Image (spheres, grey):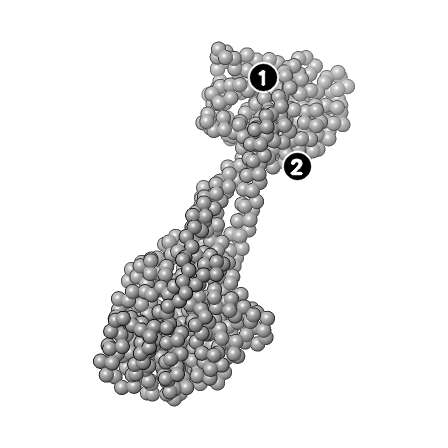
Amino acid sequence: MGKRVLRREPRAHWLLLAVAMVVLLAELCLNGYVTHAGAEDATSPERAPEPAPAAATGAAAVQRAEPGGAVTSRAVPARTIALTFDDGPDPVWTPRILAVLARYHARATFFEVGSRVNRYPELARRVVAGGNEIGSHTFTHLAPGAPAWRMRAELTLTGNAVAAAVGRRPVLLRLPYSSTPSALTAVEYTAWREAAPGYPLVLTDHDTRDWSRPGAEAIARAVRPGIVMLHDSGGDRSQTVAALDRVIPRLQAQGYRFVTVSEALRLPAAPAAGAAERWRGQALRLAQLAAAGLTRFLTAAMVAAVVLGLLRLAVQLVTAAAHVRRARRRHRRPLRDLGPVSVVVPACNEAANIAATVRSMVGGDYPAIEVIVVDDGSTDDTAGIVERLGLPGVHVVRQPNVGKAAALNTGIRHARGDILILVDGDTVFEPDAVGRLVQPLADPRVGAVSGNTKVANRGGLLGRWQHLEYVLGFNLDRRMFEMARCMPTVPGAIGAFRRAAVHDAGGVSRETLAEDTDFTMAVLRAGWLVVYEPRAVAWTEAPATLRQLWRQRYRWCYGTMQAMWKHRRSVLHRGAGGRLGRRGLGYLLLFQVLLPLTAPMIDVYTLYSLLFLPFGKAALVWAVFTVLQAATAAVALRLDGERYGPLWSLPLQQVVYRQLMYLVVIQSTVMAVLGGRLRWHRMVRTGAAAVHAGHPGRAGSA
């Protein structure tokens, strides 16, 4: 309504937000890709039945693909044992195995998973420092059957990870889930030939099957001359450690030596990695660590958001039940004539609704009422329409356009009653609304009363969503705020004020866009009680398009932030001001600012959950939360005397309407941080609220 100093609304942050969300999703996907790596255990996938070609299955344990296509193989010399450990490094078991090897001056080959090397690079360095060697076991413990491009990518990533950790490039390969040459499958053979022909493929002569935990002695008996497969990660490896402590000294006493695969076959040592490879490895490690940290943070944020949401629902339901009991006691008392009531209607270009608004005031059942319409520089015929109505007790005051707050103060100065009702120019009252609205003012402690605003144009999907928001969000919150004695907002659509409270609050301030919130907070800080009267019903015209909704909520949100900042010192006060600060402002800060600001990250995490977590589990969490919301909405609708029909649109509200609301909070926060002043976004009226003048058939509200 008013003219304000303007600052161009920021836009670049939307691009930054989109880029940040894409990067966040990429990081989460990286973590999901990495952490869903497996390791051989009792639930390892069954091996494909089709065997590899005979040239491979009948060869020795170490095989190489020659340029001409032939496969050559080599076996470990006699009285030589090459211990190999898969799936590491592991912070628990790898150091214990290294300690046993060092105790007996034995060396071994560790086929390490690249993602785990990134996670524990110091363990990889300890492996090499002990005279052992590192081979590749893919980056995520890749299962058989993966396409060749993915195998090549994983080997490259593993090479970079090892290079960054130890400065050398691994040259040996063991495929996950592989075993002896005779057990080599066609899938494993094809993957090796197509994706990693330059890597010698290291199978095993003796698979101890220690992943199945057959007992330390059984594992020790499986250790014989040749290449021996063991594991230093993927589960409890205490039996493996115990078996090594038994078998190594026993076989050394018989003249056997324990060496790496490269030593046993006299292969060249792993070459030094280039600087580029090491830098790529470091970048990969940092990205992986950041992804893991982000995932932990968002998991905690998701849990906190769910817990806070459930706690909020519980508090709303408990306080709503208490408020119903209080309201019923109030409603048992007969309606009283509390003296003259002055209704102030600030109006700027409200020709579509103003006639119905004024008629609904003077046509009600309250006996002594005057209506003051303050025309705030309208360019349409708002004032003329009111004047031509010729209704008794209705006065028109014209002024230049100086804003809604100034128009309200003008109307208050012209009002004669000690009870003031402040009404928007598009609001239509029920016939009994004025009488019910002023009844709580019979208590001398009450300085203001909030009425029950209902959405008139609720026919479409957007209207249904706003109707649910008014009932589920606004009205349940008002019941809770009254019980906590910290009501932060009496809506501009329908609110009654004691003139003394208006005086104590210093009138309606022009310092914020949410003048109703700012004014109510000032009334609270002046020591007055603010209550909610659910049976005082007024109909308002809600935005009919997403663009209009955006503008309205942007103004509301930005103005609320201004009011919160203006009254921030109430946190330190005692009495009514302290209740506003510690309860009201704390609630608004948490549920209307901070949680919405984290909502984009939560949505990205939800998408990540659908991609990487069991779908049934993610769907169950969403379904349970939606059912709880629907149940709460049903209670709120019942308390407001509304039908349950709009509940079907509630799940859809979570994927469109909710996102719009949190984007409004983000835009408002950016604007507030930049210190800008927002223009007044006026909504185009269609007269929808006028349809509900004297609306018949409304169920009673509790």
Residue hosting label 2: 91
Q: Is residue 662 at all visible to an observer of this figure?
A: no
Of the numbered discs in the image, which one, if any, rests on residue 96?
none
Residue drawn at (40%, 57%) of the image: 8
Q: In this view, does 200 lie above or below 314?
A: above
Amino acid tagged 2: Pro
Residue 73's x, y, as percent?
57, 13
Query: The N terminus lies in which quarter of the figure?
Result: bottom left
Residue 623's x, y, as percent?
43, 52
Residue drawn at (55%, 74%) of the image: 577
Residue drawn at (37%, 68%) of the image: 3
Residue hosting label 1: 62
Q: In this view, does 427 lie above or below 291?
A: below
Q: In this view, does 62 lie above or below 585?
A: above
Q: Earlier in the sequence, mark 1 or mark 2?
A: 1
Label 2 secondary element? loop
Q: Is residue 393 at all visible to an observer of this figure?
A: yes
Residue 405's x, y, as percent?
40, 74
Label 1 secondary element? strand
Amino acid tagged 1: Val
Please tell me which residue lies in front, 87 or 243. Answer: 87
Query: The C terminus lies in which quarter of the figure?
Result: bottom left
Residue drawn at (37%, 80%) of the image: 411
